[in-house]
Image (cartoon, grey):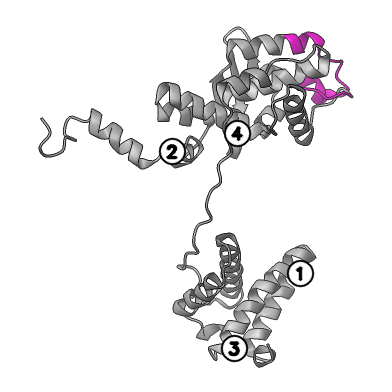
Amino acid sequence: MSSAADSALRRQIDAFLEYLRTVKQLSPNTVSAYRRDLDDFLDFCAAARLEDASQVEESHVRQWLGVARHRGLAPSSLQRRLSALRSFYQQRSRELGERRNPALAVQAPRRPRSLPKALEADQLGRYLAPPDDDPLTLRDVAMAELLYSSGLRLAELQALNLLDLDMQQQLVTVTGKGNKTRTVPVGTVALSALRQWLAQRPAPADDDAERALFLGQRGRRIGPRAIQLRIRRLARHNGLGQDVHPHMLRHSFASHMLESSGDLRAVQELLGHSNISTTQIYTHLDFQHLASVYDGAHPRARRRGDK
């Protein structure tokens, strides 16, 4: 990279990295990641004889990403590189008043969204059958039943308080992403499991535990990592033959609800999604299916020749 070693662009990027280190106080690992991505950009600019940040155009940024994509870089890596370059130009805008950002309008390929597997109904029956009735196992079954019954996220389950659960109305009030609350139904099987757990709930160790619905062995609110481990342990103890995690139970809830009802909007509300496209991803629903529903239901959707 000798041709880029003493260019104005090199000095500008070095100043940006120093800003990240001293002013933003980012971690050394984060600064190193920025440096790797921007060093690659410097190599590209040296080959293209671009020596100053002001010479870079949107077309150059597209070429840079195109070369990296041709080398086989994953979409996530391309997005990270683009983000680093955008941040560099955003800082120049704040510091120098430059309005141009050649990376702003460029879009990297989207990374494919991987979907967790949904458990089948018979698998859930085996998974949720309590192997014994000690207090910790009763708690684990109650957590798993509630995750599946109401489609909760891990963080939502962990943050639940006793007052969030209305046993009489069979409802639970959940605080989700963006501090948004929603109230969702709780099934009778989950309520039964919760009653068994609450009858064995240990004495709380502090004020937060006094409020918490689920406690650990030491009487404190159970942590997210402990929930993950206990949900996985339940699968092993019941001979399920595969790992289970909280998000798999949420995904199973969404998939089974949609299969039974076909009501995408209702599932969206229950999951607490602000955008219906997120619900479509969770439930494997695509626009082809929506089109077939439209064609069958809308009075003006009939194709030519249909009678």
Asked if one can make out residue 153 in the rendered structure from this viewpoint, the answer is no
When the figure is inspected, residue 121 is found, relative to residue 43, above or below; the finding is: above
Residue at 64% across, 75% down: 38
When the figure is inspected, residue 188 is found, relative to residue 43, above or below; the finding is: above
Taking the magenta stretch, the answer to whether it contains residue 198 is yes
Looking at the rendered structure, the secondary structure element under dot 2 is helix
Residue 264, quarter of the rendered image: top left
What residue sits right under mark 2 in the picture? 276
Asked if one can make out residue 171 in the rendered structure from this viewpoint, the answer is yes
Earlier residue among tags 2 and 3: 3
Q: Amino acid at mark 3?
A: Ala
Q: Position of residue 8 (x, y in %)?
A: 63, 89
Earlier residue among tags 3 and 4: 3
Closer to the observer: label 3 or label 4? 3
Mark 4 closeness class: few <14, some 14–19, many ≥20 residues within 10 Å: some
What residue sits right under mark 3 in the picture? 46
Looking at the rendering, the stretch of residues picked out in magenta corresponds to: 196-217
Residue at 66% across, 32% down: 246
Q: Are marks 3 and 4 in contact (CB under 8 Å)?
A: no
Earlier residue among tags 2 and 4: 4
Horizontal side, residue 147 vs residue 134: left or right: left
Say which quadrant the C terminus sits in.
top left
Looking at the rendered structure, the secondary structure element under dot 1 is helix
Disc number at residue 21? 1
Earlier residue among tags 1 and 4: 1
Q: Are marks 1 and 2 in contact (CB under 8 Å)?
A: no
For marks 1 and 4, give the CA distance: 33 Å
